Amino acid sequence: MKIPIFQVDAFTNQLFHGNPAAVCFLNTAQPNAWMQSVAQEMNLSETAFLLPETEAYRLRWFTPAVEVDLCGHATLASAHVLWESGLVKLQQPVIFYSRSGVLTARRKQSWIELDFPVKRLDLVTIPEELSHALGIVPIFVGKNQFDYLVEVESEEILRNLQPDYGRIRSLPVRGVIVTSKATTPGFDFMSRFFAPRVGVNEDPVTGSSHCCLAPYWSEKLGKKDLMAYQASGRGGELRLSLQGERVLISGQAVTVFKSELEC
């Protein structure tokens, strides 16, 4: 059996930038262990598995280590491939059934708009291990159901962070979002995302982290529409629009290659 698989760079319009994701098309359900093995073989921060279900698609996401509840860049990559391959018409939205509920994607000219749930923060005292892991004194620490969010004083501090991944791995969360107000023209805020506990030391561009970054910066800056940049080595741009308890996360994508798994 041959199973189509694509690699897509998400949240960018340039090859070898943004966040690479694999997108695997299934005709029938496959065992969890098989999907985890494929994700390990691809060795990307996320591999998405799509299975047709009525007029929508069942969508699951695996890092090389675990299945996760929500992933933005692999969702964006999946929608991109469905439109590019002609499985969904360009003018039609893509509907996904996932562990985070129903997610939709729509084409907005050359951009793809994802409709995701807001993940709000609770203010917490910074754990000593987190402070040591980052090597900085934060100006804010919050926590949602997935991650810690840490604000630092400047974009320079953010860009120069060299965290201790071993210490971060010991924390009982998916990952750590670090953010700052932007000084780079054209952007409202910057972020980086560290998730060694789920097998990704630093994620290049993380859509799901912006489910809490959007409401956080919307309140701080007094605006609902925001431009964000994730300042990893590859980097990526995101357009955000806060809509009550939903956040519209928009990005671009480009296909790197398409192939077949020999199964």
Image: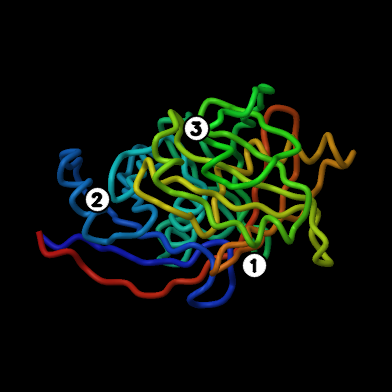
Nearest the viewer among 126 and 194 is 126
Q: Position of residue 65 (x, y in %)?
A: 28, 45
Identify the element where label 2 is drawn: loop
Q: Residues within 10 Å of mark 3 (few under 14, many from 20)?
A: some
Residue hosting label 1? 110
Q: CA distance from mark 2 to mark 3?
A: 19 Å
Nearest the viewer among 196 and 21 is 196
Q: CA distance from mark 2 to mark 1?
A: 27 Å
Identify the element where label 1 is drawn: loop
Nearest the viewer among 218 and 242 is 218
Left or right: 90 in relation to 57? right
Q: Position of residue 194 (x, y in %)?
A: 50, 48
Q: Residues within 10 Å of mark 1 (few under 14, many from 20)?
A: few
Inspect the image, locate mark 2, and give the three-letter code of the amino acid beneath it: Leu
Left or right: 260 in relation to 197? left
Identify the element where label 3 is drawn: strand
Q: Position of residue 75 (x, y in %)?
A: 47, 49
Of labels 2 and 1, earlier in sequence is 2
Inspect the image, locate mark 3, and give the three-letter code of the amino acid beneath it: Val
Residue hosting label 3? 102
Q: Residue at x 81, y 39 (%)?
A: 218
Q: Residues within 10 Å of mark 2 (few under 14, many from 20)?
A: some
Nearest the viewer among 175 and 145 is 175
Q: Quadrant of the C terminus?
A: bottom left
Q: Residue at x 69, y 23 (%)?
A: 123
Q: Quadrant of the N terminus?
A: bottom left
Inspect the image, locate mark 1, and give the three-letter code of the amino acid beneath it: Ser
Residue 157 image-quadrant placement: bottom right
